[in-house]
Amino acid sequence: MPQTMQNNSVCLASKVTPSQRQLQWQKLEFYAFCHFGTNTFTGKEWGDGNAAPSLFNPKHLDAEQWVKEIKNAGMRALILTCKHHDGFCLWPSKFTDYSVKSSPFRNGQGDIVKEVSDACKKHGIKFGVYLSPWDRHEKTYGTGAEYDSYFVNQLTELAENYGEIFCFWFDGACGEGKNGKKQVYDWDKYFAVIREKQPNAVISICGTDVRWCGNEAGKYRSAEWSVVPSYIGDQKYTAENSQQADENFAKRVKGTDEDLGSRSAIDGVRDFIWYPCETDVSIRPGWFYHKSQDFKVKSVKKLMDIYYGTVGGNSAFLLNIPPDKNGLISKYDVRVLRKLGKSLRQEFSENLAVSASVSASSENGENKALNVLSADGFWQCAEEDVIPEITLEFAKSVNIDKVVLCENIETGQQIESFEIYAENESGFEKIGSGETVGAKRICRFSPNKTRKIKVKITSYRRIATLKQIELYCKS
C-alpha cells in the first residue's frame, strides 16, 4: 500500500471513476469549435440581438469544406454555435422568427445545423452543439419559467432532429435581456432534456461532464487532475468565473486555480467528482471571423505547443475555426490547418514501442506488463510495489523523442509523479518526468538513441496502472 493512502482525502479521490459518456468523450482528444452567425457579418464578437436577419447570407456555404479541413488537421469532432448570445438561430426554429428562415440564405429554406451535422456524419467525425442560454433578442429572457420553457423547446429541437450529438456546450454568460433583467437558468431542467434525448452526450463547461480550463488563452496546467472537489462542478461556480462582458477575454489567464487536485489542494475534502478538463482557444484573436484578422492566425508552432500541453497533459483541446462571410473556412486558416495536420502525422507516424519486449518490477494477476503495447487490457503493479517500474527493450538501438503514457482511467486517476529513463553507455539517464498522467501524457525531449526506455512511477494513490505506452521519433 503506497504511503499516499495514509491521507483519507487521497483515498476517497482515488476511488472516483469516469462515466461511460466521459470515457467516450476522452477518446476524441482534439476537436473544433465553429463560431458562425450574424456576428460574422456585423464584425462583432457579441451581438446585441438587433442585427437584421437580412444581413445573414453566406452565399457559398459548404459544410463539407469545413469538415474536410477540420478532419485533415487531426480533429475528431465539431461543435457548432447553433445560437450565440444575440439569439439568432442557425436552424429554422419553430419558436422564433429570428433565425435562418427569415434570412436570404437558401431563400429562407436553409438549415445550417442540418448541413453541418450531415457533413460530420458523412465524413466520420462527431457533431456537437453550442446553445447560448443568454439570449439578447428573445423578449421572454429574464422572466424565469417562461424563458426556461422557450429554451427547453429549442434544446429539444436540437436534441431530436439532428442525429447523434456528442456534446452540448454551455458557457456561463448571463447578462441582461431586452427587459433589463437577467435570467436565473434552470440547469437541472435543461440537463434533464439532454439526458432523456441524448443520453450518451456530455454536457460541457456549465455542465456535469466536462470542466472548463478557466481561460481562453490556451494556457494549460502542468498537472491536470480529472478528480476534483465536487464544488468545482457547481454551475454557479463556473458562471461566476466565466465571461460576463464583451471584453478581450481570449487574453485572460487565471493563475489562482493552477492546482485543483494534488494532495495539498484536496486536503480535508470529502466529496469528489470526475470532472475532466477541456481547453478552448481560437485560431484567431477573435471567436468570429473578421477579415482584419486574416494575418493574425496562430502559427503551427503555437498550435502544436498547445496540443502537447492539452492533449498531452490530460486535457481535451477545443480549437475554434470560424467560417467567413462566404460560409467557408478562410484560406488563411486552411493553410495553417493543413500544416498542423501534416505536423501531427509526422510527429506520430510510427509507434516504435510495438516492436519492444516489456518487463516490469511487478504485475497483478492478468494485468501484465505486455498489455501496454496493445489496445486491450492494462498493466497494474502489485500492491506492495511502492515505486513500480516498467521497461521497454529493443533488439537494436532506436531514436526516441517522445514517450506517450496513458493510465487506465476506468480505475481512476492514480499517478501523482513519474520519471522516464533512457539507457546509454553509462547506464540509465533521466530524460523526462511529470506530476500526473491521466488519460494521456506526452513527454518530449531531444532525440535519444537507446535500446531501453524505463518508466518509474514515483508516487501513486491507490492502484498504479498504465494502459498504454507509445514511443515516437519525428519522421
Image (cartoon, rainbow, N blue to C red):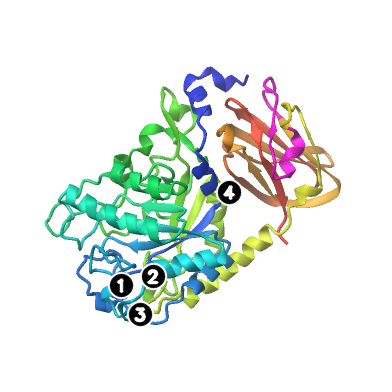
Residue 197 is covered by the magenta coloring:
no
Q: Which residue is mark 3?
A: 106
Q: Which residue is mark 4?
A: 312
Graded by Cα atoms within 10 Å as few (under 14), some (14 to 19) or many (20 or more), the crowding at tag 1 reads: many
Going from N to C along the chain, the mark reached first, 3 or 2, is 3
Distance Cα–Cα, label 1 vs label 4: 39 Å
Whole-percent x, y for residue 36 in the image: 37, 68
Distance Cα–Cα, label 3 vs label 2: 10 Å
Q: Nearer the viewer, mark 4 or mark 2?
A: 2
Going from N to C along the chain, the mark reached first, 1 or 3, is 1
Q: Which residue is mark 1?
A: 100
Label pair 2/1, CB-CB below 8 angstroms: yes
In the image, what residue type sits under mark 1? Answer: Val
Q: Nearer the viewer, residue 338 or 115?
A: 115
Distance Cα–Cα, label 2 vs label 1: 8 Å
Whole-percent x, y for residue 455 in the image: 71, 37
Graded by Cα atoms within 10 Å as few (under 14), some (14 to 19) or many (20 or more), the crowding at tag 2 reads: many
Magenta extent: 368-388
- The residue furthest top is 6
Whole-percent x, y for residue 28 in the image: 55, 53
Going from N to C along the chain, the mark reached first, 4 or 2, is 2
Going from N to C along the chain, the mark reached first, 4 or 3, is 3
